[in-house]
Image: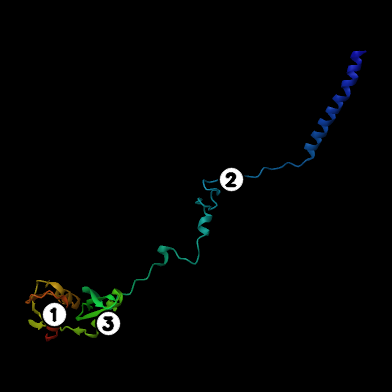
Amino acid sequence: MEKQEAKIVTDPTTDVVAGTNKVADTATADAPAETAPATEPATRFGGSRGQGGRGGRGGESNDRRNPRRPRRGAGGRGERARPEFEQKIISIRRVTRVMGGGRRFSFSVSMVIGDKKGRVGVGIGKAGDTQLAIEKAVRDARKHMITVPMNEHSHIAHDVEKKLSSSRVMIMPAPGRGLVAGSSARTVLELAGVKDVTAKLLSRTKNKLNNARATVEALKQLKA
């Protein structure tokens, strides 16, 4: 009797367990199959490969380039317009004035400009700023520009000599020797475009402004 009672007690539990298993099987069979989302391997910086993320080098990164901005080698930069005259500073000095309230500083710039085709000029500019003094010197040099008479080979016709203030300069043609000159006289002859010439400073002065002006005055005496 005890064995039969044990069977009676255990039979309902087995039926209940079997019933729950059947219900679970039917529920899983009727439910639609879920697909796992496709994941792509992530790059080092968090973006997927091929997406042009922070570290990606995919094809979409080229689409993000600004269409209005041309590439460096595509359009090409336009050439800068060459200035009409070349400029060279021969001397720059800082001038100090002692006033009642203290010292005041200004700059004095001496400059030579020329186109290397026979036109040359010497100018001086004074201002409290260096750039402003240079601009003044260029304007002054344009006002005092001369044209040097030369032949088709950029040679001068004869010797010239000129004394200005404490400076004295002599210019002589020297075929085949090139430009032989020193100090600011060389700068003036070079920017004027004179070739095969020798210049000699006959004075002891070291004032570059006076030497340059004496050279210009000597070039004025040339005849075609």
Quarter of the view holding residue 129:
bottom left
Among the two numbered marks 1 and 3 on one chain, the one whose residue lies closer to the N terminus: 3
Mark number, residue 215: 1
- The disc at residue 40 is 2
Please name which of the two marks, 3 or 2, marks the residue nearer to the observer: 3
**Would you say residue 153 is visible in this rendering?**
no
**Where's residue 128, x and y in %?**
29, 76
Would residue 77 be found to the left or right of residue 157 on screen? right
Mark 1 or mark 2, which is nearer the start of the sequence?
2
Residue 39 position, x and y percent, is 61, 44
Element marked by disc 1: helix
> The residue tagged with tag 2: helix, strand or loop?
loop
Q: Residues within 10 Å of mark 1 (few under 14, many from 20)?
A: many
Mark positioned earlier in the residue sequence (3 or 2): 2
CA distance for labels 1 and 3: 20 Å
Q: Tell me the tag on residue 179.
A: none
Residue type indicated by callout 1: Thr
- Disc number at residue 139? 3
Tell me where residue 134 appears, x and y as whole percent.
27, 76
Q: Secondary structure at mark 3?
A: helix
Percent position (x, y) of residue 203? 7, 77
Q: Residue furthest front?
A: 100
Identify residue type, mark 2.
Glu
As drawn, 92 above or below 59:
below
